[in-house]
Image (cartoon, grey):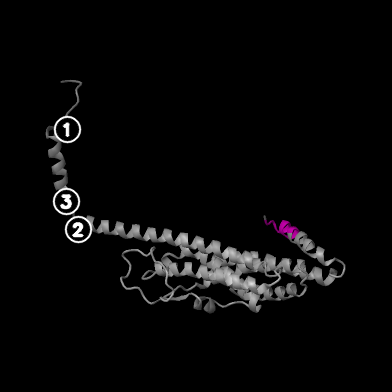
Amino acid sequence: GSGGFRKRKHDNFPHGQRREEKENVNPPSALMTSFKSFQLELDSRHDKYERLVKLSRDITIESKRTIFLLHRFTSAPNGEEILSESEVKLDAVRRKIKQVAQELIGEDMYQFHRAISPGLQEYVEAVSFQYFIKTRSLISVEEINKQLIFTAEDREETTNMTSNSHDKQPHTWSLKVTPVDYLLGVADLTGELMRLCISSVGNGDIDTPFELSQFLRQIYDGFTFIGNTGPYEVSKKLYTLKQSLAKVENACYTLKVRGSEIPKHMLADVFSTKTELIDQEEGLP
């Protein structure tokens, strides 16, 4: 009648019959099967990415703890104990990196590079800091990569390995630090060397600041050769590197010109005040 609802054609069929017809219209096709396999592959890849992010976070935390430990080298009565303890911590970090290498078996590392890059940069900073304290020189990327070759003798649980990975795992695992991660780690190293300079002066070590100033100048000259031709992250770190160099050179200037006027126990306070003034002039937080 007038004013009533108009029935659609399919409303005349029973509800169960409509459902059966709908299922018969869309049977499982080869296209849907392909998309389901794509879904499983993407889910597996996303899960692996999240596991790598977690491992990278653990690598970053342990590397930072190693750096904090190494800063006690100048004030510790026995520096060899600090170096031995730092080596134990770095071995634990390498075991985490081994898990990363196992996750990347059969994968293109650069597809997961953003997940592991922060951890690798922090590891480069920690291992290069330890290497400088031992040898007063800069570790090479080849030497770092040699330490990241793992053998099957290092028995370790691999519960994070996915079920769809290779049935036969290789006897060796390796993970190469990319040149960009190496450069970014070295750029962060300069900040730790600047702090080492201040703490050394506070402990009465007058020779270390001049040695660090020359070393940082060499690193800065190397980065200037790259300039704006390198990755954006590297050129961005160049400003921070320049600030660390300026603070160390300012400390050396104070030692050379006014070292005899200022008592040794007050030198560290003078340097800290001067570095704060430099940060304020440059607009750093």
Residue 109 drawn at (x, y percent):
42, 69
Residue 71 lies in quadrant = bottom right
**Which amino acid lies under the numbered mark 1 shown in the image of this protein?**
Arg
**Which amino acid lies under the numbered mark 2 shown in the image of this protein?**
Ala
- 122 lies above or below 17: below
Residue, x 18% and y 27% (percent of image)? 6
Residue, x 70% and y 73% (percent of image)? 212
User: Which numbered disc, 2 or 1, marks the residue closer to the eye?
Assistant: 2
Q: Which mark is residue 30?
A: 2
How crowded pointer 2 is (Cα within 10 Å; few <14, some 14-19, many 20+) is rated as: few
Residue 191 lies in quadrant = bottom right
- 7 lies above or below 44: above
- Quarter of the picture holding the N terminus: top left
Residue 269 drawn at (x, y percent):
78, 61
Asked if residue 223 can be seen in this view, the reply is no
Which stretch appears magenta?
Answer: 276-284
User: Which numbered disc, 1 or 3, marks the residue closer to the eye?
Assistant: 3
In the structure shown, which secondary structural element does the residue marked by tag 2 occupy? helix
Q: Earlier in the sequence, mark 1 or mark 3?
A: 1
How crowded pointer 3 is (Cα within 10 Å; few <14, some 14-19, many 20+) is rated as: few
Residue 49 drawn at (x, y percent):
41, 60
Q: Which mark is residue 8?
A: 1
In the structure shown, which secondary structural element does the residue marked by tag 1 occupy? loop
